[in-house]
Amino acid sequence: MEELSTRPFPPGSYPVVVVGSGPAGLQVSYYLTRLGIAHAVISSDEAPGGMFRRFPVFQRLITWTKPHAPVERDSAAYEWFDWNSLLGEEAQHRFLVGAAMSGGMYFPARHEMEQGLTRFAQAGNVQVRYGTTWEQTRRDDGGFVLSTSDGDYRCNVAVFAVGMAQPWKPAIEGLQDVPHYVDVKPVRHYTDRRVLIIGKRNSGFEVADGLLAYARQIILVSPRPAQISVVTHSTAAARARYLQPYEDHVLGGGNVVLDAAIERVERMARGFRVYCRSTNPTRDLVFEVDEVVAATGFAVPLRDLPDLGVATFYQNRLPAQTPFWESATVPGIYFAGAITQGAIGLKKYGIPSNSAAVHGFRYNARVLTHHVAQRHFGIRPVTQRLYPADVVDHLLAAATRNPELWNQQSYLARVLEFSPDTGIVARGTVPLVHFVDTAEPDAVAIAVETDADGNIRPAVYVRRSGDVSESLLQSDPLHNFETQAHRAQLRTALAEFIG
């Protein structure tokens, strides 16, 4: 009992309860504190870090923190080149993953990421009640009740930052006998063995890359062709640095990357027999291998939230969400972190958001907290008023130097509102789909987009009398959109507002 009384956030009533102490939970709590919103943070873990306390299995992240960049390290624009640190309002809270890195690579090791998150929690004074497991959820007249291993927490707003942390396998006969990515054995276990990996996204290629020096042969199998992140502009696709197994396949080096559906898996006395049907050409294939690994992804551990009415999709792996990451069916329940990839956005040119990764969802967390502050607690955001002569430079500076627009292309946008009563007001950053779907007031939003030809361009959305029109400004080889040509284009697009 003494231990329970000395830990922060004992069971009781709080305006907001945040579940999770991974990067999203820490980021949400950081901004809730700065907005003056009382809240509790609970976590079943024993320290900060979330999934980074264990994954990736092979200990090296796929997202960069570059020690040397074209911008100053103490500037906000450096976030563009540091995909792993959380956002901080003060210098001592920023770019902490890089400070934990030993050098030699600009992809941090797993333990360096964990150290960076721990340093952020310490520097930002983010308090968490560790060792407290969320178990059940219900509603009563006062809001939500979260039952935990320590007792009940009552709140009006609940934010679940629990990650895509639940290993998931598709309903394939025999797959229950196959170890998941999270259960991969030490690499020497695979020495001189034929290994079949189900899945050709990051975890599949990560395992294949980790086993290259040990396995006799590696076969990567999934129905769809491998998507490469540098082509799809998404961290959800396979990162280029994992593609040595694919290169071995192309050069005939003994490994195989196959487009095929897994029909069933049979456990044999020694090893597995895997039945597949390839898609190009269509034919039945059977592989006898020593080991199989299901790199088939993860789901959100929603526990009983669906029973509360939280709608799901993607084979029940993700909750359906509004543009502000609120449950689409249960108001007052929000999601943060990798779960926010469930808010699809406009998906311009087929490119998804970067909400599956820290460098995308950290911005979602900041927008989310400001939205919660205004909607649920009446805390209006700080705004900036502009003169008409300042509008063009303000928007082009955002498109050129604002890292959240670059890291969340076609997904987040900077907004200016135009009103005869209040003048021109900068409303900060909002989800682009929310801007497009809102009828008033008259406003302009600017986002950064990569078009169908691979050109990075500012996209300008003008909302006038409820109608939204869109125009793309020209690209620039050095990504400088503050040129005279861009100013002229933008003035023309906004002529009805600024003359």
Image: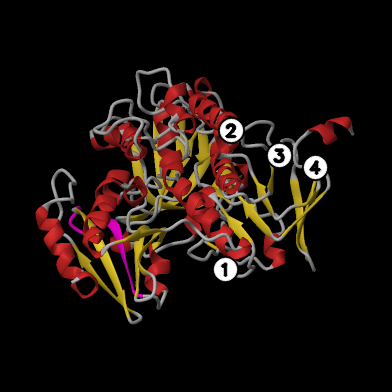
Quadrant, the C terminus: bottom left
Q: Which of 367/337 is in front?
A: 367
Which residue position is annotated with label 2?
121
2 vs 1, front mark: 2
Tell me the tag on residue 44: 3
Magenta stretch: helix, strand or loop mostly: strand
Q: State the extent of the magenta-drawn residues as a range.
A: 442-454
Q: Which of 352/223 is in front?
A: 352
The reply to whether dot 2 and dot 4 touch (C-beta < 8 Å) is no
- Residue 40 shown left or right of residue 239 in the figure: right
Which residue position is annotated with label 1?
328
The answer to whether residue 324 shows anywhere in this view is yes
The reply to whether dot 3 and dot 2 touch (C-beta < 8 Å) is no
Q: Secondary structure at mark 2?
A: helix
**Magenta stretch encompasses residue 241:** no
**Gap between marks 1 and 3 measured at Cα:** 26 Å
Picture coordinates of residue 175, whole percent (x, y): 58, 47
Tell me the tag on residue 10: 4
Pointer 1 or 3: first along the chain: 3
Classed neighbour count for the residue bearing mark 3: other residues with Cα under 10 Å, few (<14), some (14–19), many (≥20): some
The type of residue carrying mark 4 is: Pro
- Indicate the quadrant where residue 218 lies: top left
**Gap between marks 1 and 4 measured at Cα:** 30 Å
